[in-house]
Amino acid sequence: MTPRRPAGADAFPRKTVEPFATRPAEDGPLYAALDLGTNSCRMLIARPAGSQFQVVDSFSKPVQLGQGLEASGRLSRSSMARTVHALQVCRRKLEAHKVTRMRLVATEACRRARNSRDFLRMIRRETGLPVEIIDAEEEARLAVISCAPLVCLRTEQLLVVDIGGGSTELVWIDLEDVEPKERPRAIMQLGNGFRDSRPGGARVVDWISVPLGVATLRDQFEDVEDDQGRFALMSWHFEEMLADFAPYSLASTMEDGFQIIGTSGTVTTVAASHLGLRRYDRTKVDGLIMTSAQIDRVIRDYLSLGPDGRRADPRIGRERHALIMSGAAILQTLMRVWPTTRLSVADRGLREGLLYAQMVKDGVLAPDGLNGVA
């Protein structure tokens, strides 16, 4: 499809964001959020600070929980053991900081696995942690509200994309009836539910959870030996899965005022590669605006490197090299089919959404202080 004129270079300026740096704990309640995904176990411990929060401690470990799930429909003993070991580290951090307010969630791998309930009982027995499985809509809502500070005040149509290990969530939001200065706060209110629309508020046009993420898409085409051929097949297959997403057929009619926010390890890795960062720096990545041409250039570079080159590339890292091309196939597909040449990069997602939701509910975080991109 041929999109109409994209937004100008200054339509969505770079957003300066508060870095989520690890800092000593000060007075005030501590909150924890844990995201147990198909590929990684990640946790943040933070305290509220005005309309944002301050990260006190964090943890991230690739556990490959979904390894073999595509073929067997079950979580393997080895993947469960790796995950429990990571969760034991999380438990020790929670105990060290004396955290009592927490939400610990599992997503697509546990939603799909036939033995997920047994696994949750194993987690409770071995770690004492109250991990719960959330549905796809709640996962999408939490990703959306985490991105509220990155919403441009000029944005009338917003697409938030969260590329996970086992699934990819897309949420299309109509902000046309919302006063520009109120748009970030209107996004936060969607945490109450996508159907909780109100006059003058944000309206979810459609949302979809595609059961393909960086791990599951890679697994479906792991028998294809040709690197570039595999990439093309992954891109084609992912685009097929978007056919039932309602805004897909409307994309070519969109005008200016459209913004895509992408949140995932894939998006931040591509951004770091574009910036040439040999050591990752969140303050340079979160809020960065990338053009389609810049994204395509990075992906062409990945393809030219081949599997061995990507494995040795410090910008990608040894923990992500096996997953980067499936994620890149998803990202490039999304940029090709929507009416924009720009992507807002978000180094934030489910964990940040969990923290925002808990803090707003407890009245210790002030969403009224949110300011989007001017």
Image (tube, rainbow, N blue to C red):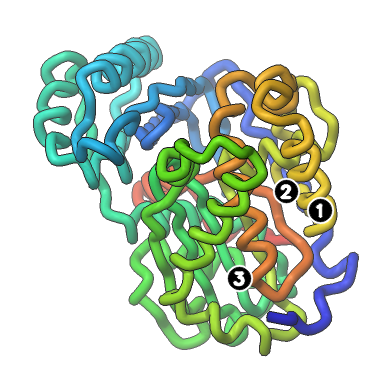
Q: Give the distance between the C-alpha atoms of the residues marked 3 and 2, in whole angstroms.
A: 15 Å
Residue 21 spot, x, y in % from top left: 64, 26
Mark 2 or mark 1: whose residue is earlier in sequence:
1
Q: Quadrant of residue 82?
A: top left
Q: Residue furthest front?
A: 225
Which residue is disc 3 drawn over?
158
Return the residue nearer the eye: 208 or 348: 208
In the rendered image, residue 193, in percent from the top left (x then y), is placed at 34, 67
Check disc 1: other Cα within 10 Å, few if <14, some if 14-19, many if 20+.
Answer: some
Residue type for callout 1: Arg
Using the image as rendered, state which of residue 29 and residue 121 is in the foreground.
121
Is the C-beta separation of discs 3 and 2 under 8 Å? no
Read off the residue under disc 2. Answer: 287
Q: In the rendered view, does 218 fall on the left or right side of 132?
A: right
Quickly name the residue at label 1.
14
Q: Are marks 2 and 1 in contact (CB under 8 Å)?
A: yes
